[in-house]
Image (spheres, grey):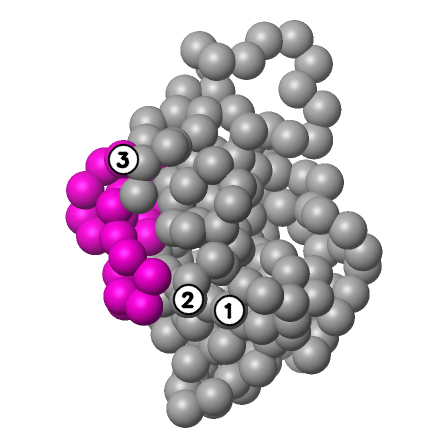
Amino acid sequence: MKYLFSIIALFIFTFQLSAQSGEWIELFNGKNLDGWKVSENPQSFNVEDGVIKVAGPRGHAFYMGEVGNHDFKNFEVMVELKTMPKANSGIFIHTEYQENGWPNKGYEIQVNQSHSDWRKTGSVYSFQDVRETYVQDGEWYTEHVIVQGDQITVKVNGKIINEYDESEVRTGDLGDKKLSSGTIALQAHDPESVIYYRSVKIKILD
């Protein structure tokens, strides 16, 4: 009987994973941060009126939920967000939970229209950076990140603004700042940075 239950459970789990592939899945339930784990300063992330408000000292909200077992390799993530003046944030990919500091694993895709950091929204932070801005503070927009093989494509409001090919840009030992697999995380950068996220969707690719 135990064996039968194990087979059934495995079948259900496999079906759930296959059903998720190729479909957009919302990772933020609009009510709370269930499925997310915030490092360092949990008070920097709050849900207000169905939106994640990021405001406070450094911290990162890592997705730790059941979708894809929070371990994504080839995928698309699309967020709907709004920055306030002088705000800085980021969307980390292929990362993993850590209790303190800036995430050591994976890449950061920058969120920044008017912060003093010259690396603006859409930058693959410090590896292939964007200097121009494509939206204004106070404006809701979409930031769409596609990760496939060695490539990262970043779109803002449907327009491609950055195409990064790791195999062409980097050689040798890449350390942990590389494409591999992992979860995603949202960044609280500093107490003066206020950002709103109202949707965080993922599509798992083959």
Give the number of the disc on residue 194.
1
Question: How many discs appear?
Answer: 3
Instruction: From the image, give the main secondary structure of the stretch colored magenta.
Output: strand
Q: Quadrant of residue 200?
A: bottom left
Disc 2 target residue:
84
Residue 200 visible in the picture: no
Q: Residue at x 70, y 14 (%)?
A: 173
Mark 3, mark 2: which one is toward the viewer?
2
On the picture, is 19 further left or further right than 8?
left
Q: Which mark is residue 161?
A: 3
- Amino acid at the residue labelled 1: Val
The answer to whether residue 31 is seen in the rendering is yes
Q: Which residues are magenta?
A: 134-161
Residue 170 coordinates in the image, percent (x, y): 55, 13
In this rendering, the label closer to the viewer, 1 or 3: 1
- For badge 3, the amino acid type reads Ile
- Quadrant occupied by the C terminus: top left
Residue positioned 62% across, 57% down in the render: 189
Where residue 149 appears, x then y in whole percent? 42, 28
SS at mark 1 in the image: strand
Query: For the residues marked 3 and 2, what is the alpha-carbon distance in whole angstroms?
Result: 21 Å
* Front residue of 77 and 71: 77
CB-based contact (under 8 Å), mark 1 and mark 2:
yes
The quadrant the N terminus occupies is bottom right
What's the residue type where badge 2 is placed? Answer: Met
